Image: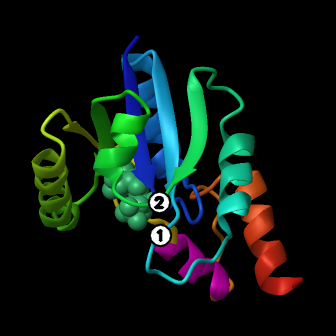
Amino acid sequence: MSTVIYPGSFDPITLGHIDIISRASRMFDKVIVAVLKNSTKKPFFSIDERIELIKESLTDIKNIEIDSFDGLLADYVNKKGATTVVRGLRAMSDFEYEFQMALTNKHLNPEVETIFLTSSSEYMYLSSGMVRQVAELGGDITGFVPEIVKNKILEKLFKG
Ligand code: ADP
């Protein structure tokens, strides 16, 4: 069975992430969406909230598992019995960081292959950070995230 790991912060999940997950789910038997716990960034949503939002956003895709991990991705990939990692590539700005990560993971675990799916053009400039920023400033984030994610962001920002 072919399994691919899609690691990230997903804070929160956006339509750009969902596009990558649904495309990967057609290429592999199983996609493990793995939420990174040891991010240095100050999180907006907790790990549990992020997992819940991912679950609720992906009810249409059956061959996925949602998990979280900390420590090295190379070790986590091993633990899950997988050898492939998928990442999304947006503008050129993603390239250098992603290249560095892929090579580091390969060095740590030579079995790991990282594959890249290019972002769909409508999501090329979409990031979780941008969504949070627009929402904080009172802008409309419809079309960037699923409705349930939008509602949860607004609840956190304006009703908390
Ligand atoms: P990280 O904090 O590890 O970059 P993110 O949650 O921001 O995690 O992103 C996880 C992965 O999804 C990364 O490979 C990122 O490039 C990709 N990604 C994020 N947004 C998009 C998008 N709009 N289109 C395609 N890929 C995306």
**Element type at mark 1:** loop
Residue drawn at point x = 63 percent, y = 89 percent:
137
Q: How is the image coloured?
A: rainbow
Q: Which mark is residue 38?
A: 1
Residue at the top extreme of this rendering: 1
Of the 4 image quadrants, the one containing the C terminus is bottom right
Residue 116, position as x, y percentages in the image? 23, 41
Magenta-highlighted residues? 129-136
Q: Is residue 101 visible?
A: yes
Which residue occupies the foreground of this view, 130 or 77? 77
| Relative height, residue 142 to residue 78 (above, below) | below
Q: Position of residue 87 (x, y in %)?
A: 31, 46
Q: Quadrant of the N terminus?
A: top left
Q: Secondary structure at mark 2?
A: loop
Above or below residue 1? Residue 37 is below
Q: Residue furthest bottom?
A: 137
Give the residue drawn at x 17%, y 32%.
Answer: 111
Up/down of 43 relative to 101, above or below: below
Given the image, on which type of amino acid does mark 1 rest? Asn
Label 2 sits on residue: 70
Q: Is residue 9 left or right of residue 53?
A: left
- Quadrant of res 127: bottom left
Residue 60: x and y in percent read 68, 26
Residue 83 placement: quadrant = top left
- Is 137 situated above or below 98? below
Magenta stretch, main secondary structure, is: helix
- When asked about the image quadrant of residue 143, the answer is bottom right
Residues at badges 2 and 1 in contact (C-beta under 8 Å)? yes
